[in-house]
Image (cartoon, grey):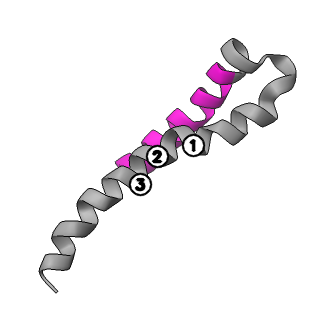
Amino acid sequence: MCISMAGLFLGPTAVALLNDHVFGVEGIRYSMAVIPLIFGVPVLLGLRAFWVPTTRYD
């Protein structure tokens, strides 16, 4: 539940910050396209760290 709450708060806030400070008023589509790259890479790196210990027990 905490991860869901963090996602609900961080996602729209990150889009708004990118839109205001990086891409400008007309760049909301770019802001929304960049967010999965920003938050997806750490998730994939963390998934690898989680996957290795779980495969040892199988």
Q: Nearer the viewer, residue 21 or 44?
A: 44
The residue wearing badge 2 is: 41
Instruction: Assess whether mark 3 and mark 2 are in contact (beta carbons under 8 angstroms).
Output: yes
Instruction: Assess whether mark 1 and mark 2 are in contact (beta carbons under 8 angstroms).
Output: yes
Corner quadrant of residue 49: bottom left
Instruction: Assess whether mark 1 and mark 3 are in contact (beta carbons under 8 angstroms).
Output: no
Which amino acid type corresponds to the residue marked 2 in the rendered image? Val
The residue wearing badge 1 is: 37
Residue 17 percent across, percent down from the top left: 63, 20
The residue wearing badge 3 is: 44
Is residue 34 rendered magenta in the image?
no
At 71% across and 41% down in the image, what residue appears?
Answer: 33
Which amino acid type corresponds to the residue marked 1 in the rendered image? Leu
CA–CA distance in space, label 2 to label 1: 6 Å
Residue 7 percent across, percent down from the top left: 49, 43
At 72% across and 22% down in the image, what residue appears?
Answer: 19
Q: Which residues are magenta?
A: 1-18
Give the class, few, some or many, for how many residues have Cα within 10 Å of label 1's Cα (few <14, many ≥20): few
Q: Nearer the viewer, residue 44 or 11?
A: 44
